[in-house]
Amino acid sequence: MNRSVSGSLPFFALGWCFLAIPTAFSQERSIDLGVKVVNPYALGLDNLAAATPSGPPGSFSIGGGASIKEIRIEITSKSVEVKSAREVKEFIEENGISFDSNAASFVYYLNPDLPSVPKLPSNTTLQLPVLRIPAMEDERNFPKHPVIAVVVEPKLKESVRQDIDEFESKVMKREKKFAPDIRSDLDSIDEDLNQVYGDKVPSSREMLEQVRQYVAALQAIFSARRGRPVSSEESNEVKLIKSDLREKIVAARQGNPDVSVTVKTLKDQVEISGFIVCFAPEALYKANQCDLSFSEHSSPTEQGIAAATYMFWAIKPGETRSASDVRRIPVWWQGGKFKSVELTIR
């Protein structure tokens, strides 16, 4: 499949920095935020203008080309009450930022408990991104249309694209050699990877990291074949990856790619604390191997994780063996929220 990065906007320059903003999940969540200059002419610059990080996180300088001047910009946020998804788009674009899948990703980063922009309830107060240009503090001079586009996690996305390119060259070009059911699964996987590759849906760091893990798992399955048929265990893993990728794409099209999940640990129906909550996408689950865990001990503990079907369990600090039941839970936004997961301590 031919792959391309989405967006018909002119691409003049990309710079990025780490931006950290307090959220409900932790004292501070960081994001790798990039900036594309899409309309340098509105700043009195030409199409050779380049954006580079400058000063505090979220600050950039745009300059270069024939002009000797530099324009300093800042990406900030503002609390705004909006009535609809259309008002979200209009506000962001009137404040100098293109509204696309990356802008939606940034809105979800700023509002981690927001289930969906398209299904936004009326009169919702949100933190929305704003472009600030100190040299144009006078509102009469500020352009009321997009000047820049944001790119969420640009370095991670580039790494994921490289992994997908390798998957394409080493696996998909040989798919005709596989059994029909494997070919069908790979075609579905390839279709959904193209959505990620092309930045066609909102995404998050958690979602992208899981996609990268899936591509690595697929590479391992098919690079180890050496002419032998795909085993039933490998075929099942491919099907689980296919199913999870489809869940992620559908969830991202509908709203926030991450879901706010609360986990409680219980013994004799009484909540007890001090346990590490482990989780793994079903396709990557290995018994007693806690590669992913909530940042805070139970109970309760809350975290945003990418939409998927997960295995959840709890362990004691310093141990690897499960101290609770292992529960298979599909994680989706349901009716604007996600109910808590309850793990029973043995």
Image (cartoon, grey):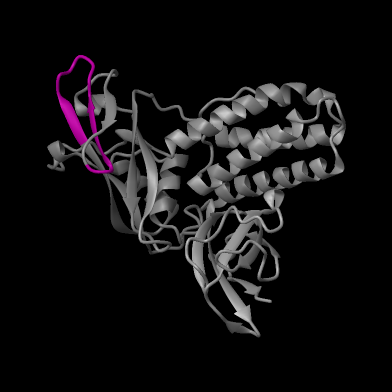
Q: On the rendered image, what quadrant is the N terminus found in?
A: top right
In the image, 280 versus 201, the foreground residue is 280
Residue 71 on the magenta span? yes
Residue 80: % across, % down: 31, 58
User: Which residue is found at the position 32% from the left and 36% from the top?
Assistant: 146
Residue 331: % across, % down: 62, 59
Q: Which residues are magenta?
A: 56-72
User: Which residue is found at the position 57% from the left and 81% from the top?
Assistant: 271
Q: On the rendered image, what quadrant is the C terminus found in?
A: bottom right
Residue 310: % across, % down: 66, 57
Above-or-below relation of 7 to 345: above
User: Residue lying farthest front?
Assistant: 318
Inspect this view and state whether residue 317 appears.
yes
User: Which residue is found at the position 58% from the left and 71% from the top?
Assistant: 340
User: Which residue is found at the position 67% from the left and 66% from the top?
Assistant: 322
Asked which quadrant contains residue 290, the reply is: bottom right
In the image, 143 versus 195, the foreground residue is 195
Q: Is residue 166 left or right of residue 155?
A: right
Above-or-below relation of 60 to 210: above
Residue 242: % across, % down: 72, 43
Residue 253 on the magenta span? no
Above-or-below relation of 49 to 104: above
In the image, 155 versus 76, the foreground residue is 155
Count of numbered marks: 0
Inspect this view and state whether residue 204 appears.
no
